[in-house]
Amino acid sequence: MAEAAESSGDPGTTSPRPLFAGLSDISISQDIPVEGEITIPMRSHIREFDSSTLNESVQNTIMRDLKAVGKKFMHVLYPRKSNTLLRDWDLWGPLILCVTLALMLQRSSIDSEKDGGPQFAEVFVIVWFGAVTITLNSKLLGGNISFFQSLCVLGYCILPLTVAMLVCRLVLLAEPGPINFVVRFFVVIVMFAWSIVASTAFLADSQPPNRKALAIYPVFLFYFVISWMILTFTPQ
Amino acid sequence: MAAVDDLQFEEFGDEATSAANPGATTIHIEGPSESPAHQPGLSRGSGGEEDDELLGNDDSDKTELLAGQKKSSPFWTFEYYQTFFDVDTYQVFDRIKGSLLPIPGKNFVRLYIRSNPDLYGPFWICATLVFAIAISGNLSNFLIHLGEKTYHYVPEFRKVSIAATIIYAYAWLVPLALWGFLMWRNSKVMNIVSYSFLEIVCVYGYSLFIYIPTAVLWIIPQKAVRWILVMIALGISGSVLAMTFWPAVREDNRRIALATIVTIVFLHTLLSVGCLAYFFDAPEMDHLPTATVAPNQTVAAAK
């Protein structure tokens, strides 16, 4: 084909006729359809969809986002190897969970002691900087997951630990004692294991195979520290 | 030990003949082009350690060339930092094992790091150590004051940030000072062995690994147990550091060499004893006569 193009664009040469010289004389018969319409059938629908999100009511927007968040919560609670969390990532869920956890974990302002439990800002910083550090670590080790996808997964997998915090607060309303502690310990351990299993199910596939343990260990440390903060929470 | 001496002698021999003997240079020319592909194979073969020592030793100046070849991305790109995390799981485990079992004569940097220093180990070992010390300190204080009715448990979260500052400052500033000192001495005395800054950070980071189980065991509220643990941990990690840096200062003035090694070990001691003293309350209750302690415990148990 290249030789034919060269020979047809080169009129002055008197070189012997190359192999495909007659190709340019071939005309296309009429019964081979080479024309048609090139339209994207969905285009008009997409345009309608785009403009409709501007015009829809606020309740619709909020409910759509809440449903997406709720669907991801279900994926975390029943972890299977699916990539829904990765495909449609959002950071609303992690924000809601982190704020809830930090609100419940902060020490009360009545507590005037210097040493005590973490403040709201400390919990917030630990969760977000911990997640960012783990994401950077997995990217530096060569994982092929995007930055926000990884933040999304790590944030959503805090859900079991937030549930554990709620349960611990309820249990702490009862009278303190060793049984109280054993119950809380058991709940936190189970939820910690659940978080690890959930995040591993989502994150493990994106790591290079001979570095999986290196990428998973920081996740383990992260959830361990959060579990420790939940377990040692003492109300005033 | 004879094998080690043979290898050290051979190191001088190869470098002397490589310039004189063109036949030997063919081996050296193949070395740098082969070793990027060979390096994973070399590291994997833990059985052929003598071969590894040989190749690591007579390529001592070529390894610096390799290091230059590896880090070719400019420092503002992400790929530049990825070269510091170019380790596999088994390599990290091997390096941790090497820091736990110091064998006299085997240099940690030569044997395990061999021009592939990583930042994964130092960073995450320090992070684990920070949380291990803070959590163990908290637990041990709780257990010591368990029987007392007047003691109100607080999680003492501020100690985490203090521990983080101390550990990370030690793991980064002391290697910086040591590297600067070695560079300065290197300009005065030609040393055979010189380490890059990252290799020193790597050695220090991995040598801190022994303190993680030590910090967990420090929960035991017995003073004798704690001090024995300090001795053991200091012995192991101090000897790893000493054996790593002794070849680097050996050529120097005897007194300066000894002073350097003593300072390294002294700073290490300061770190471990300081952490023990600050984060772990003294178990005074156990040292009072048991007559006063036992009634407290039996009273608490009865309630």
Image: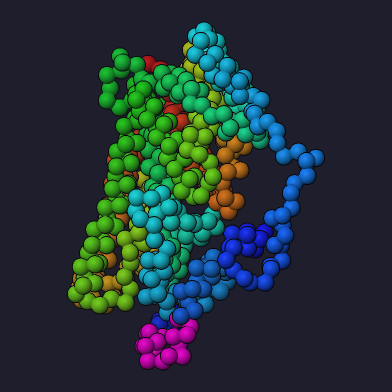
Image location of residue A184, percent across then percent down: 53, 23
Number of numbered labels in the structure image? 0
| Residue sitting nearer the eye, A116 or B126 | B126
**Left or right of A114: which side holds B96?**
right
Name of the residue lying farthest toward the right: A31
Image quadrant assignment for residue B80: bottom left
Q: Which residues are magenta?
A: B12-28
Q: Is residue A14 magenta?
A: no
Can residue A145 be spotted in the picture? Answer: yes
Which residue is depicted at the point 54% across and 19% down? A50
* Relative to B288, residue A181 above or below: above
| Residue sitting nearer the eye, B77 or B142 | B77
* Relative to B36, residue B144 above or below: above
Q: Is residue B24 magenta?
A: yes
**Left or right of B127: which side holds A156?**
right
| The N terminus of chain B, quarter of image | bottom left
| Residue sitting nearer the eye, B61 or A121 | B61
